[in-house]
Image (cartoon, coloured by chain):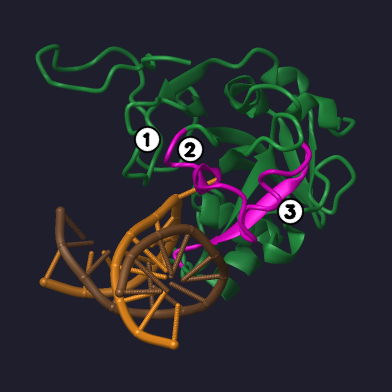
Chain colours: A green, B orange, C brown
Amino acid sequence: MATLPPEFYARSVLDVAPDLVGCVVTHAGVSGVIVETEAYHETEPACHAFAGLTPRTQTLFGPPGQAYVYRSYGVHALLNAVCERDGVGAAVLIRALQPLTGLAEMRSRRLRGGRPRADANGGVQARDLCSGPGKLTQAMGIWLSDNGTSLSRGPVRISGRAREWRDPEIVRGPRVGITSAVDLHWRFSAAGNEYVSRPRPPIGPPRRPGARRASAAGPRL
DNA sequence: CATGGGATTGACT
DNA sequence: GTCAATCCCATGC
């Protein structure tokens, strides 16, 4: 499968984010299917670009199709795909992958770098390898040095959907871990997929009709 | 120049 | 459920 061209990313983040679900990230011999993304745009305060162009957000404002990798909580590297036209600060955060190839290498990197929850045999469950934005960069060996590199040419590459991921059912909800712009439901995940990060989006109809819950539909695009 | 706050994770109560 | 780790950088004095 060919990598996605820069033109794929040169659209609204709200179109690119759901379209990336089902696409494949490959790096250093390991790969996984994207099962969860979030959209960020300079016009809303949860986006790093909201404060304007700074040394940190230089890549974010750059041309589409580049990797924006930054350090989160002083600990983790988070992978984003820069979107929209050059000069606009917008990106899609890759939040979770379903491991595809190189699971042994992923386990090795996760055990070495972090301290993932292990089973009785000291192994890491497949669903714990890439079920979070910090976990997946660690499992795939993606670091801050990949910031600004091309997602079409590598070293980190994203290719299109495989046959079985043609037209996936996508669930939409509020973004995770942010304190501002919580009314924007810009998180997109593959419905019912086991490799999505926490909190897992609800699947199916509400169990308690009277319970207060967030609407699945966003207030605006 | 000092300070405070994260687009998180994993351990612990 | 709560909380520390850890560091870049935006902000304010």
Q: Do marks 2 and 1 both belong to one polypeptide chain?
A: yes
> Are discs 2 and 1 less than 8 Å apart at CB?
yes
Q: Which residue is mark 1?
A: A200
Q: Residues within 10 Å of mark 3 (few under 14, many from 20)?
A: some
Q: Do marks 3 and 2 both belong to one polypeptide chain?
A: yes
> Is A191 a magenta residue?
no
Q: Which residue is mark 3?
A: A102
Q: Is residue A173 left or right of residue A135?
A: left
The reply to whether residue A96 is in sight is no
Residue at the spot x=69%, y=57% of the render?
A140
> Are discs 3 and 1 less than 8 Å apart at CB?
no
Q: Quadrant of residue A15?
A: top right
Say which of A185 and A166 sits in front.
A185
Q: CA distance from mark 3 to mark 2?
A: 19 Å
Q: Do marks 3 and 1 both belong to one polypeptide chain?
A: yes
Q: Which residue is mark 2?
A: A196
Image spot of residue A76 (x, y percent): 53, 63
